[in-house]
Amino acid sequence: MSKLTDLNEDVSELIENAVETATEDAASFELETFFPYRVRVFYSDVTRALSAVYQRDYGMMPAEWRTMAILGSASSGLQATEIVARSSMDKVVVSRAVKRMEERGFLVRESNAADGRSFLLKLSDEGRSVYEDLGPKLKAVEQRMLDGLSASEIEGFLEVTRRIRENLAGELDGVSD
């Protein structure tokens, strides 16, 4: 019985320590130094810098540009589900972007000959022209973002992001945006 009592005491001590640590961590929490917050601010800055160009020139929203970029780099038409998978955007967001792009004449739907039920999306001639116009402008914004950084700093940053995504991979199974 003493082993069971010792085990219960050990578990109780672990729980108390965990509660104390959580309380201390919560008390010392600073949003400005919290890594996920800083990543979100960084993402917002990057998105705003890029969207300034495609919003100014074509009145496009970020989801529309991402959809256009995916279709523009595809060798053939894609199903909307493929855009969702490649973009990290929710299917509702992609659906709205597709609808708006179609209304503006930037993309066309074609029947999918492989199954007859779904549609393939691809850029229209006008959409291709917009994509080709925006590409160099957005690459120039990217260059300004990276100004003053060495190739090894950029490679290091990309390696860190890859490793963080690997660390999160197991936690994100089945979790949507």
Image: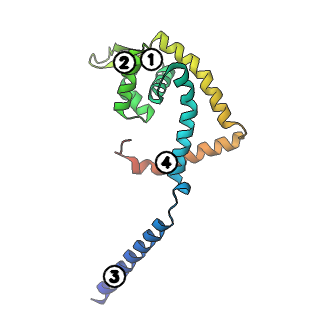
Tell me which amino acid carries mark 3. Answer: Leu
State how far apart marks 1 and 4 are (Cα): 30 Å
Which residue: 70% across, 43% down?
Answer: 152
Tell me which amino acid carries mark 4. Answer: Glu
Tell me which amino acid carries mark 1. Answer: Ser
State how far apart marks 3 and 4 are (Cα): 36 Å
State how far apart marks 1 and 2 are (Cα): 9 Å
| Residue at mark 3 | 7
State how far apart marks 3 and 1 are (Cα): 63 Å
Q: Position of residue 86 (x, y in %)?
A: 44, 32
Precedes in sequence: disc 3 or disc 4: 3
Precedes in sequence: disc 2 or disc 4: 2
| Residue at mark 4 | 166
Precedes in sequence: disc 2 or disc 3: 3
Mark 2 in CB contact with mark 3 (< 8 angstroms) = no
Q: Within 10 Å of the Cα at label 2, are there few (<14), some (14-19), or many (20+) other Cα atoms?
A: some
- In this view of the protein, which residue sits in the foreground, 97 or 157? 97
Q: Position of residue 108 (x, y in %)?
A: 39, 13
Left or right: residue 137 versus residue 92 is: right
State how far apart marks 2 and 4 are (Cα): 31 Å
State how far apart marks 2 and 3 are (Cα): 62 Å
